[in-house]
Image (tube, grey):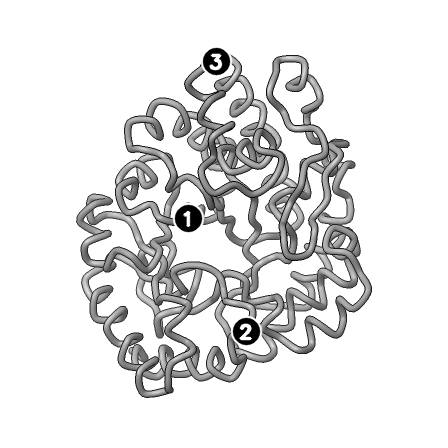
Amino acid sequence: AFIRACRGEPVPHTPVWFMRQAGRSLPEYRKVREGIAMLDSCMRPDLVTEITLQPVRRHGVDAAIYFSDIVVPLKAIGLDLDIRPGVGPVVETPVRSRADLERLRPLEAGDVDYVTEAVRMLTAELGPTPLIGFAGAPFTLASYLVEGGPSRNHEHTKALMYGDPGLWADLLDRLADITAAFLRVQIEAGASAVQLFDSWVGALSPRDYRERVMPASAKVFDAVSGYGVPRIHFGVGTGELLGDLGEAGADVVGVDWRVPLDEAARRTGGTKPLQGNLDPAVLFAPRAAVEEQTDLVLASARDLPGHVFNLGHGVLPDTDPEALTRLVEHVHRRTAR
């Protein structure tokens, strides 16, 4: 159902999966991750396989998403970075000069052989359930590299983008090549679809996105177009960018919770399947309220060429897993053809 929806084909029910469905909301995840650093866990195929499968077993979602982190390919090419609990990715020496750019060498498949092994293990276990591969988009990766870590205002990133447009373009182009290589590894190992996460791109104006970012994202989508797998593009706070996100080359546009799906369809031209977009915080409300808000999302998606039900961002860490399981069942029941 997931693959068919991504292609705009008839489905037996609206497919469901959740961003961050494998993670801290699950007690079984917390148990297997005890004492293991995040990046270390991403490099162990046995652990990646177990964590990726956990929400499929528990919730009955229509797709699995490969458990990893957007900075894994940057770590794989030798950058000195870590993921600090409660903070996120932290880069020891930020990238802010042309000399720094030379540290970003091309990613080769052998750099992430653990990804190939894990994807193969997963596809064998998943059977007909599709596996979604993923990567961070060039802008979001650049933001982490330039800021040195998470940022509220992206001041160093924008200073570089405006102050040295040549270096900025070269940085995003190099990151596009690294990202495309990372997605190719996952697809060639067996991933059935891929999603490009541009978590921070909502910080940009439409003009800046089109002129300074979209060419790099388009390069990534073009690099994997020949595989024929669905390509999903998602960003946070991107209501003003939805049309441009669609033009970057993805087959499916992910929508956060701020824009109703019927309006998102208008902004993207009405020709692309959409993914989304229940507010993750709704899951903390009583069951009846969750179902009411879910039905509103489904109603707004009624005339779309295709719809993949998801949250408008990732599952929040304190979400009750049972609420997610009930949500999957509700969407499947409400949309059964």
Mark 2 and 1 residues: CB-CB less than 8 Å, in contact?
no
Residue at point 76%, 71% (across, down): 32
Q: Toward the viewer: 219 or 295?
A: 295
The numbered dot on residue 318 is 2
User: What is the secondary structure assignment of the residue under circle 3?
Assistant: loop
Residue 120, compared with residue 322, is above or below; it is: above
Left or right: residue 49 compared with residue 23: right
Residue at point 48%, 69% (across, down): 62
Q: Earlier in the sequence, mark 3 or mark 1?
A: 3
Q: How many marks are shown on the rendered structure?
A: 3
Residue wearing tag 3? 164
Residue wearing tag 1? 234
Residue at point 55%, 22% (across, down): 171
Image quarter of the N terminus = bottom left
Q: Toward the viewer: 162 or 326?
A: 162
x then y, percent, for residue 11: 34, 68
Q: Toward the viewer: 87 or 235?
A: 87
Left or right: residue 324 compared with residue 76: left
